[in-house]
Image (cartoon, helix red, strand yellow):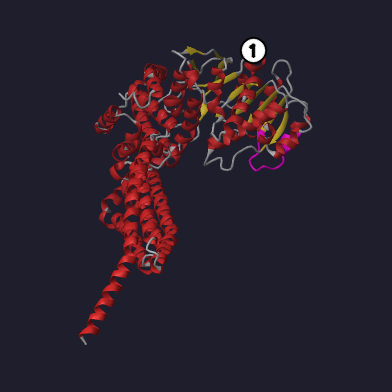
């Protein structure tokens, strides 16, 4: 009896140690891959940052109309955003290489799935980037147009347009990432409708006086139009 | 290449004509009687030149009965001209640009000595003023004949506030209406302008023929004169489209400024340009003006557009603008020196593409309206007789601020007072 228990214990210990021995090289490989990728990422980040700084990347982005990217960047610097993105990608690649070293079916499946998901992540990031740029552009267009039309609630309109576009972009990005699509649809509907309702209520109820003033101004302007306008510009 | 600019219908109609001495493009609506009177006036020009008149055809159909009748005469030949752009009311500057290019192309094709572009109506009934624009081209060797409209207090305000003083300060020639639109152009100048458009189209820069007129003439050392043509009838102001007009006019002018930087940086001071004819300066009453709308737009701009202006204007200028906006509606006064610096800063931001160019130019509208308020209020009390002095004072302010422009233009990052 005692002999049989002893045999079982030896067998299970041997099995555990054998499996651990199988895993150890993989774990060492993972740690090594991570360490190497971190060092590589750090070096690449420095190179990218210096390169972008030397070509005044932040200012160039502003001139090309991507000023809104600054808001999304760490320390308001798109250069840092770019260098950190590069570093992140290198570390992620190192991690995936390390995982693959385990040589287990499930890990290779995980790696395959992660790689298959990368296009979704890239697509979602692009949607967010374009959405942010379009939102800023439209918000500025609406602001300038509304000011020139003498609308007192120009800023409110501009903010409303900006958030409508951003909410739309975020919903599209989440849809792309396949994260709880039904909840995203529902949340988007509620949020989008909510913003529109807020705008309507703000103009219709909370800004009642403002609207009254605008309408009065409209009446005044209608009466002004009846009087011949002496100004000729071009 | 130039033939591409000529509308199909005009190409067909000009096909039987071998050559001409003068080509007159009439975009303005002169009416049947006006066209007949114009043709009679053209026949009296010395030297009996062969003249082709391109008359705008609003519906793009075949010429009317009267024009067909006129075609039977040896001179001038009256041809239909469907050269107006897609939306002449929504984008008048674009329509004028298309028409101008087409006129220069027809003129080049027919080997004409000169051409004349007519886009305005005048208060005078007779269109004889058009012949006055043509005479210097035929009798003397002028390359550009610019119009000198009778000055009116509250008319042509974009020209008074920006186009004239800026052109005068940059290129050193006192051309009162450098943007025309009614101008006479020699063959040499028309050829150069066509070349400019081809280059601009190749580099996808949207230049405007009228904006290129004065810069090309001055920078190429061509001859300019002005002609008193009477009082122009300006189109009424469309307040809902005001910022669009500002953007359409200033965009090409700032583009030309960028293109000719080497030329205007050499020019110092300004000299007068010969003027032909006599000025009819009628007395004019401005009456009581309602400036509240413009003051409100300016104040709204100061409140909501600071974020955009701060990308364009230096802090000292922003501070002064805020100071102007804080004064009471009756005391809003934008000094000429401040206005000149604002225009220069916007021109620089346009060159550097600090923000989207259309946004930039549209955001300038409230500032422009503030200047109009100051100007109108000053002339309301001073009277119409002092218009010339007032415009001269503004032009001198632009000239005095030119070193500021040159410094910012050369060192946009370093020079920030």
Identify which residue is drawn at 49% across, 19% down. Answer: B262
* Horizontal relation, residue B307 to residue B61: left or right: left
Q: Closer to the camera, B213 or A3? A: A3
Q: Name the subunit of mark 1.
A: B
Residue B363 shows up from this direction: no
Q: With respect to residue A157, does B129 lie above or below?
A: above
* Outermost residue, front side: A3
Q: Closer to the camera, B92 or B315? A: B315
Q: With respect to residue B403, does A154 lie above or below?
A: below
Measured from the top left, where is residue A177 in percent x and y? 40, 61
Q: Is residue B62 magenta?
A: yes
* Outermost residue, bottom side: A1
Identify which residue is drawn at 28% across, 39% down. Answer: B303
Residue A189 shows up from this direction: yes
* Horizontal relation, residue B118 to residue A81: left or right: right
Q: Is residue A74 magenta?
A: no
Measured from the top left, where is residue B153 in percent x and y? 42, 25
Measured from the top left, where is residue A23 in percent x and y? 33, 65
Which image quarter is the N terminus of chain B in?
A: top right
Identify which residue is drawn at 58% across, 19% down. Answer: B145
What span is in magenta? B55-69
Q: Residues within 10 Å of mark 1 (few under 14, many from 20)?
A: few
Q: Closer to the camera, A188 or A8? A: A8
Q: Which residue is mark 1?
A: B140
Q: Secondary structure at mark 1?
A: loop
Q: Closer to the camera, B60 or B105? A: B105
């Amino acid at each position: 009896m005692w002999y049989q228990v002893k045999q079982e214990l030896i067998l299970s210990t041997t099995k555990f140690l054998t499996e651990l021995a199988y895993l150890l090289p993989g774990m060492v490989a993972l740690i090594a891959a991570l360490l190497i990728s971190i060092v590589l990422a750090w070096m690449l980040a420095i190179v990218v940052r210096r390169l972008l700084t030397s070509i005044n990347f932040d200012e160039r982005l502003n001139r090309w109309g991507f000023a809104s990217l600054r808001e999304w960047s760490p320390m308001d610097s798109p250069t840092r955003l770019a260098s950190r993105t590069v570093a992140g990608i290198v570390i992620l690649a190192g991690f995936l290489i390390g995982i693959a070293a385990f040589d287990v079916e499930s890990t290779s499946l995980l790696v395959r799935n992660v790689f298959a998901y990368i296009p979704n992540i890239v697509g979602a990031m692009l949607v967010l980037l374009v959405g942010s740029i379009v939102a800023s552009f439209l918000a500025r267009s609406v602001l300038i147009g509304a000011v020139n039309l003498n609308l007192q609630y120009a800023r409110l309109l501009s903010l409303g347009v900006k958030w409508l576009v951003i909410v739309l972009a975020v919903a599209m990005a989440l849809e792309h990432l396949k994260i709880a699509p039904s909840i995203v649809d529902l949340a988007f509907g509620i949020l989008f409708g909510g913003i529109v309702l807020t705008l309507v209520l703000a103009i219709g109820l909370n800004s009642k006086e403002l609207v009254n003033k605008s309408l009065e101004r409209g009446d005044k302007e209608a009466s002004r139009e009846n009087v011949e306008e002496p100004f000729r510009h071009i | 290449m130039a033939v591409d600019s000529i509308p199909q219908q005009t190409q067909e109609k000009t096909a039987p004509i071998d050559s001409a001495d003068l080509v007159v493009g009439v975009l303005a609506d002169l009416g049947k009687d006006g066209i007949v009177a114009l043709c009679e006036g053209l026949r009296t020009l010395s030297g009996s030149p062969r003249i082709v008149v391109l008359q705008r055809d609003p519906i793009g159909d075949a010429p009317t009965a009267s024009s067909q009748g006129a075609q039977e005469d040896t001179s001038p030949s009256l041809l239909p001209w469907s050269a107006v752009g897609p939306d002449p009311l929504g984008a008048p500057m674009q329509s004028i640009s298309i028409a101008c290019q087409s006129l220069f192309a027809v003129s080049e094709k027919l080997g004409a000595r000169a051409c004349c572009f007519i886009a305005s109506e005048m208060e005078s009934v007779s269109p004889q003023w058009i012949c006055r624009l043509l005479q210097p081209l035929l009798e003397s060797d002028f390359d550009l004949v610019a119009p000198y409209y009778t000055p009116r207090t509250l008319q042509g305000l974009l020209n008074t506030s920006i186009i004239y003083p800026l052109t005068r300060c940059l290129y050193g020639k006192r051309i009162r209406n450098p943007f025309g639109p009614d101008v006479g152009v020699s063959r040499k100048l028309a050829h150069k302008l066509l070349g400019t458009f081809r280059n601009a189209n190749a580099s996808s820069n949207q230049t405007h023929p009228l904006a290129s007129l004065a810069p090309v003439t001055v920078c190429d050392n061509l001859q300019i004169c002005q002609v008193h043509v009477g009082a122009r009838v300006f189109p009424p102001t469309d307040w809902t489209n005001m910022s669009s007009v500002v953007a359409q006019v200033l965009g090409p002018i700032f583009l030309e400024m960028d293109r000719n930087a080497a030329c205007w940086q050499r020019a110092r001071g300004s000299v007068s340009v010969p003027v032909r004819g006599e000025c009819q300066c009628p007395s004019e009453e401005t009456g009581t003006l309602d400036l509240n709308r413009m003051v409100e737009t300016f104040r709204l701009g100061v409140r909501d557009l600071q974020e955009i202006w701060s990308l364009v204007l230096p802090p000292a200028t922003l501070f002064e603008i805020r100071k102007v906006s804080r004064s009471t509606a009756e005391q809003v006064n934008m000094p000429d020196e401040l206005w000149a610096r604002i225009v220069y800063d916007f021109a620089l931001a346009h060159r550097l593409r600090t923000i989207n160019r259309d946004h930039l130019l549209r955001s300038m509208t409230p500032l422009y309206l503030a200047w109009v308020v100051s100007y109108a209020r000053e002339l309301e009390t001073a009277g119409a007789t002092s218009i010339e002095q007032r415009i001269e004072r503004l032009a001198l302010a632009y000239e005095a601020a030119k070193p500021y422009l040159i410094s910012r233009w050369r060192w946009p990052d370093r020079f920030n007072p």
